[in-house]
Amino acid sequence: MDLPDIQSALLATYRKKRQKITCAESCTAGMVAAALTDLPGSSEIFDRGFVTYSNAAKLEMLGVLETTLNQHGAVSEQVAREMALGALQRSDADISIAVTGIAGPGGSDFKPEGRVCFARAQKNGICESITKEFGPLGRRNVRSMSRNFALQWLLFDD
């Protein structure tokens, strides 16, 4: 599914559900929020976005715990879950999506370039996370693939 199709499907799905989305982004730096608001009528489904590129922003804006960052690092499912839950608690949305990863260049043997962690939290208490290994495809490609995956992950059946 290409980006315009994903965007149209999100708009139709969340309008029908009468639900709003919020996002917490690190490596995508607002790309998810921008994609969610590209279409006319997006104010019906989008509440707000948090760009928390630095660890300080994750702590201050989303309430990510310093112990979680210290124990697992910013690129972890644990931090992604805390980002998603923090965004949900600090918004009027029904669902949140969080993205944190290493777009490149760089990385390490432990956390390679192209590793991106995602989390999705819902008002009903469900919070899920997943890690995708996009590989060293270059910064632009990793960020675009991360945006697209995050958007697609919002299209799910309850």
Image (cartoon, helix red, strand yellow):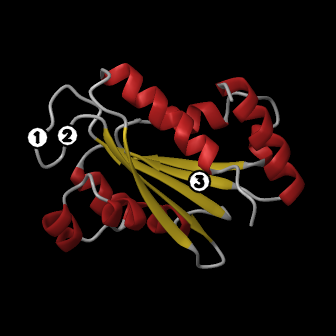
Screen quadrant of the C terminus: bottom right
Upstream in sequence: badge 2 or badge 3? 3
In this rendering, the answer to whether 33 lies above or below 124 is above
Q: Residue furthest right?
A: 16
Q: Residue furthest bottom?
A: 125
Out of 115 and 12, give the one closest to the viewer. 115
Amino acid type of the residue that numbered disc 1 sits on in the rendered structure:
Ser
**8 horizontally vs 79: left or right:** right
In this rendering, the answer to whether 135 lies above or below 133 is above
Out of 90 and 107, give the one closest to the viewer. 107
Q: Residues within 10 Å of mark 2 (few under 14, many from 20)?
A: some
Query: Mark 2 touching mark 3, by CB under 8 A?
Result: no
Q: Which mark is residue 22?
A: 3
The percent position of residue 54, horizontal first and vertical second, equals: 25, 46
State the residue position of label 1: 108
- Residue pictured at 26% horizontal, 27% vertical: 136
The percent position of residue 47, horizontal first and vertical second, equals: 65, 52
Describe the element under mark 2 as helix, strand or loop. Answer: loop
Q: Which mark is residue 112?
A: 2
Amino acid type of the residue that numbered disc 3 sits on in the rendered structure:
Thr
Screen quadrant of the N terminus: top right
The percent position of residue 66, horizontal first and vertical second, equals: 20, 69
Q: Residue furthest left?
A: 109
**90 horizontally vs 72: left or right:** right
Query: Mark 1 touching mark 2, by CB under 8 A?
Result: yes
Out of 118 and 27, give the one closest to the viewer. 118
Q: Residues within 10 Å of mark 3 (few under 14, many from 20)?
A: many
